[in-house]
Structures are given as structure tokens and as C-alpha cells.
């Protein structure tokens, strides 16, 4: 369970988030939606305990393991490293200069679970953007976390790849009763796949079951117009 009360973040005198409140039940799939600069990534960093803030953020149980796929990858792609070494950092909590056989088996299983078994032994610098996202997803899932946090996981991934990754995430949630929090610009994913949606533009615009929290009035409040989600409500597909 995640409970957020009166959450505000002010940086250098600039209000990033103001009075955000919501309670997310365990095992839910929360889609976080809103315009660029609306505070989505700041909310994610706050949930991860990486952002100074006012208000209350409670994650139960307190020691719940969290898997995280960041939007911006800080790893230098020119670093001479193998895929399995990057995934294994989630187990070792440091860079593993040697991946032993037992650890390699676990890493192989994690990569297989996200459709990336064929990437074992490959250099990180050789991976495409979509392949790197799958590797980071395997890294996030490898310890079977209670909470999986994904900051725009489909960025740089083609439509088919994004659908595959979503299927992996939904399967993981179902098998482990994990809670998923995902920042996305894909209204179709939020409306048709998430159990809950949170629409954010520095303040909370809407929160609740996805098909109740997202509507054209909410889109107008968040973005100033309704074009972003018109096709979703009409049964089509739309991307921000």
C-alpha cells in the first residue's frame, strides 16, 4: 500500500508539486499521466525516497523491496560492460566485476522473463534503445520486488516492443501481487490497462479507478485541450 498526504515539493522557490494526496492499494497498477513539467518524475523520486518534500509518504510494508526503471539512464553506454553485469547490480548492490555461475543463472532467468534471453553476453554499447529498456526491466524485476516503479518505460521503444514490455509487467504483477507505478504518456495504456490513474499537473487533477479518473474534462484541466485522449474515449488509440 502507498499512502501520500499533503505532498508538496518546492525547489529553488519553484513549486513542483502541491498538496498531492492519494492512497494506492497493494497489487494495483497505477498510471501517472500529465504534461511535461507537471511533476510526474518528481513524484516518482519522492516515492523512492530520493526527493526532499513536505507532507507524508508512507509505503507499507516499510521494508518493501522496490524495483525501478528510470527514465534517464545515467550509465555511460561506452562503458565496456556486459548485459548480465548490469542486471546483476540489482543483486550485488555494486558493479559485479565477475558474475558467478549461480548469479548468472538468476540473471538469465530475469532476462528470459522479459523476452531478452538472447542478450546474454552482449556488450551494453551494442544494445538498441528498446533492448536496453528490457535489460533495465529485468534488473528491476530480478529481486521480485513488492513495488515496481517505471518512469516512461516505453520511451524509445517501438509499438510492438512497448506492448511486449507491458505484457511482461502485467504478468509480473499478476504472479507476485506486486504494485506497479508507471509514468506514461500513453492514454490508451492508462485507460484500458491500469487499475488506477493519477492525472497530475503540479497539483492533483484526478485520481481513482482508471476509467473513472480519465475523461475529457480531466484532459482539458491537465493539458488545456482534449485532443490527447479523444481517440481513447472513442475506442481508438492516442499517444501524447
Image (spheres, rainbow, N blue to C red):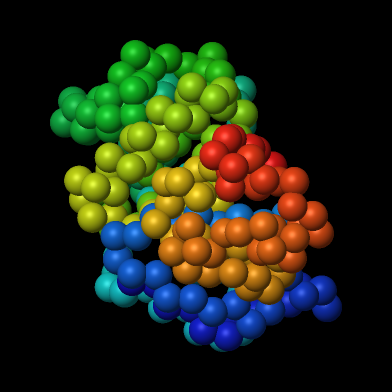
151 vs 33, nearest the viewer: 33
As drawn, 122 above or below 186 = above
* Rendered position, 138 above or below 115: below
What is the total number of numbered labels drawn onto the structure image?
A: 0
Residue in the image at 61% along x and 59% along y? 215
Quadrant for residue 2, please give it.
Answer: bottom left
User: Which image quarter is the C terminus in?
Assistant: top right
Give me the residue at 57% from left, 59% from top: 214
- Percent across and percent down for residue 127 are 52, 18
Q: Quadrant of residue 178?
A: bottom left
Identify whether 58 is placed above or below 115: below
Left/right of residue 155 with respect to residue 109 in the rendered view: right
Residue 236 in view, yes or no: yes
On the picture, is 223 further left or further right than 106? right
Left-right relation of 87 to 100: right
Looking at the image, which residue sits at the far left?
A: 102
Where residue 228 sits in the image (x, y, percent)? 71, 46
* Residue that extends furthest to the front in the rendered view of this protein: 234
Q: Quadrant of the N terminus?
A: bottom left
Q: Nearer the viewer, residue 3 or 140?
A: 3
Q: Nearer the viewer, residue 238 or 159?
A: 238
Residue in view at x 56 percent, y 23 percent: 158
Q: Position of residue 197 (x, y in %)?
A: 50, 60
Residue 79 in sight from this viewpoint: no
Q: Position of residue 46 (x, y in %)?
A: 55, 68
Amino acid at each position: 500500500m502507498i499512502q501520500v498526504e499533503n505532498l508538496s515539493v518546492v525547489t529553488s522557490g519553484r513549486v513542483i508539486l502541491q498538496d498531492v494526496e492519494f492512497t494506492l492499494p497493494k497489487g494495483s497498477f497505477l498510471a501517472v499521466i500529465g504534461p511535461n513539467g507537471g511533476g510526474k518524475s518528481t513524484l516518482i523520486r519522492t516515492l523512492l525516497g530520493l526527493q526532499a518534500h513536505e507532507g507524508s509518504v508512507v509505503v507499507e510494508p516499510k521494508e518493501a523491496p522496490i524495483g525501478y526503471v528510470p527514465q534517464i539512464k545515467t550509465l555511460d553506454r561506452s562503458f565496456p560492460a556486459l548485459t548480465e553485469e548490469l542486471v546483476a547490480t540489482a543483486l550485488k548492490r555494486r558493479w559485479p566485476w565477475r558474475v558467478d555461475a549461480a548469479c548468472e543463472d538468476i540473471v538469465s532467468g530475469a532476462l528470459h522473463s522479459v523476452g531478452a534471453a538472447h542478450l546474454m553476453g552482449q556488450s551494453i554499447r551494442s544494445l538498441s534503445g528498446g533492448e536496453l529498456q528490457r535489460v533495465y526491466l529485468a534488473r528491476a524485476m530480478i529481486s521480485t520486488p513488492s513495488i515496481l516503479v517505471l518512469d516512461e518505460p516505453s520511451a524509445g521503444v517501438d509499438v510492438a516492443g512497448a506492448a511486449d514490455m507491458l505484457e511482461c509487467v502485467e504478468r509480473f504483477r499478476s504472479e507476485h501481487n506486486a504494485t506497479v507505478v508507471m509514468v506514461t504518456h500513453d492514454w490508451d495504456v492508462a485507460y484500458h490497462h491500469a487499475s488506477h490513474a493519477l492525472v497530475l499537473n503540479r497539483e492533483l487533477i484526478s485520481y481513482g479507478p482508471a476509467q473513472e479518473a480519465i475523461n475529457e474534462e480531466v484532459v482539458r484541466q491537465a493539458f488545456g485541450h482534449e485532443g490527447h485522449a479523444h481517440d481513447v474515449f472513442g475506442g481508438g488509440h492516442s499517444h501524447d
